[in-house]
Structure formats: C-alpha cells, structure tokens
Image (tube, helix red, strand yellow):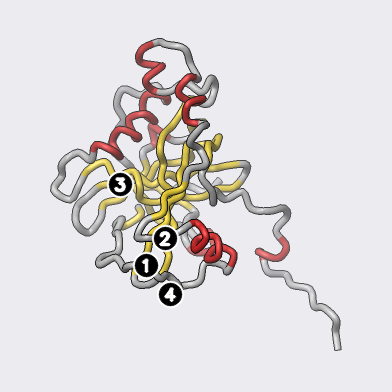
C-alpha cells in the first residue's frame, strides 16, 4: 500500500499561498477592469476585477450606483466617484464587451468593462460584512473607499488641493472594522470560517430575498 500518492491537480501544484482579499483592510491593488452589472430588478452595480499581490480576483456587487427605480444610489455612487477622481477622470465612456477569466476555474466570461478605468493602481479600503440568508452565514466584501496609490491622496484632498494622505491616515483607525448583521457575533463567524464556511449553520434570522447582481458581463486574458 502506498503511503502517499502525488496529485497533478492545479490547486495542489500551484506555487505559494493565496493573496485573495479575505479580511478588512487597506489594500494596494491594480484595478484590472470595473465590470458593469445590472440586476434583474434594474439596479446597476460595479464589480471590481483587481489584482492584489499577484492574485487576480473579483470584488462583487457592493458598488451599487443606481437603485431599482433608476435613481442614484448615494452611497455606492460616492465611492465610485472617489475612484474617478483619484484616476483623474472627469467622465468615462460607456462599457464595452470584453472577456474576463472570472468563471469557474478561471474560465472566460463575457462582461461589460469600463475601459477608461482599467489598469489603474489604487489603494482600496475593504470592510468585511457578515449576514444570514436561508439559515447560512454569508460573507461580503464592501468597498469603503479609494486612495491614489502614489501619495495616498483622497478624492477630497485632490479636489481641494490639500495635504495628501490625511484621510488615509484617518481610515487606518477603521481598516480592521467588521460588520456583523442579523444578530451574528464575531465568535460565530470565526467558528464558521474555521469550519471552511459550511452551509446551513446560521442561528440568526433569515433574509427573505437573495441579493441579485445580474449578469456579469469577459476581459482579454493576457
């Protein structure tokens, strides 16, 4: 009987650990492509396809810029506007269809990409949020803000031509904050993560409807 058999599966032979964003923090990332997504109810969100420390990943669905009725979503639009300002963009063109390797096992998917905001280095503040849905704990990465990579300037500092980096330093006080909803506790979430995020283990109330971010519209693989 063999003591151990070698595996040639890609996940078993890949060099190094993962640099996926899985915790609250301030992350230097390259925005590879912002993806426009329209939900079944008509709201518009921006999903961020980014690269952090060599790891490409998508931050899904939390930059909602319009509501179901077409009105401006003030929270999501404010954060997206920060990205515009620190990228020195007064306006951007409509999205164009491209291909992104964001499907299962990095398969290609057709997506609607905002090319004017592609390949831009920024610092992105992410805050983890935990809630419940149908008896399961759900994890979400909420983008709280952007800063210019070169000097950590905020959009406000750029517009007002004030000292760069002051807003960034203030945000460092909150970079590890985590949001717990639906009665969840830090202990429950920590246990859930340690158990490899199993389904059907939440004790809190359930959500009636699942969030829908519509069709994720594929960016060229290089």
In the depicted view, which residue is nearer to us: 140 or 38?
Answer: 140
Image marks 3 and 4: residues in contact by CB distance under 8 Å: no
Q: Which residue is mark 1?
A: 204
Residue 109, picture quadrant: bottom left
Q: Which residue is mark 4?
A: 200
- The secondary element bearing badge 3 is classed as strand
Q: Earlier in the sequence, mark 3 or mark 1?
A: 3
**Which is in the foreground here, disc 2 or disc 4?**
2
Image marks 1 and 2: residues in contact by CB distance under 8 Å: yes
**Which is in the foreground here, disc 2 or disc 3?**
2
Label placed on residue 45: 3
- The secondary element bearing badge 1 is classed as loop
Q: Earlier in the sequence, mark 3 or mark 4?
A: 3
Residue 144, picture quadrant: top left
Q: Which residue is mark 2?
A: 184
Q: What residue is drawn where x is 31% and y is 22%?
A: 90
Q: What residue is drawn where x is 52% and y is 60%?
A: 187
Q: Is residue 48 above or below residue 172?
A: below
Give x and y (percent) for residue 184.
42, 60
Q: Earlier in the sequence, mark 2 or mark 3?
A: 3
Give x and y (percent) for residue 161.
40, 10
């Amino acid at each position: 009987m063999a003591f151990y058999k070698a595996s040639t599966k890609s996940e078993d032979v890949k060099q190094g650990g993962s640099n996926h964003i899985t915790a609250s923090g301030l992350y230097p990332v390259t925005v590879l492509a912002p993806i426009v997504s329209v939900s079944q109810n008509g709201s518009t969100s921006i999903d961020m396809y980014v690269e952090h420390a060599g790891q490409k990943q998508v931050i899904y669905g939390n930059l909602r810029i319009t509501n179901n009725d077409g009105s401006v979503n003030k929270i999501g639009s404010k954060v997206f506007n920060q990205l515009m300002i620190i990228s020195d963009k007064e306006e951007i063109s409509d999205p164009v269809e491209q291909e992104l390797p964001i499907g299962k096992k990095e398969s290609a998917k057709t997506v609607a990409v905002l090319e004017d905001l592609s390949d831009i280095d920024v610092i992105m503040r992410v805050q983890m949020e935990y809630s419940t849905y149908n008896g399961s704990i759900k994890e979400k990465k909420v983008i709280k803000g952007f800063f210019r990579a070169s000097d950590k300037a905020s959009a406000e500092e750029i517009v007002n031509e004030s000292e760069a980096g002051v807003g960034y330093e203030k945000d460092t006080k909150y970079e590890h904050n985590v949001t717990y909803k639906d009665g969840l506790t830090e202990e429950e979430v920590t246990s859930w993560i340690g158990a490899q995020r199993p389904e059907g283990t939440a004790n809190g109330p359930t959500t009636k409807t699942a969030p829908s971010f519509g069709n994720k519209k594929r960016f060229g693989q290089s």
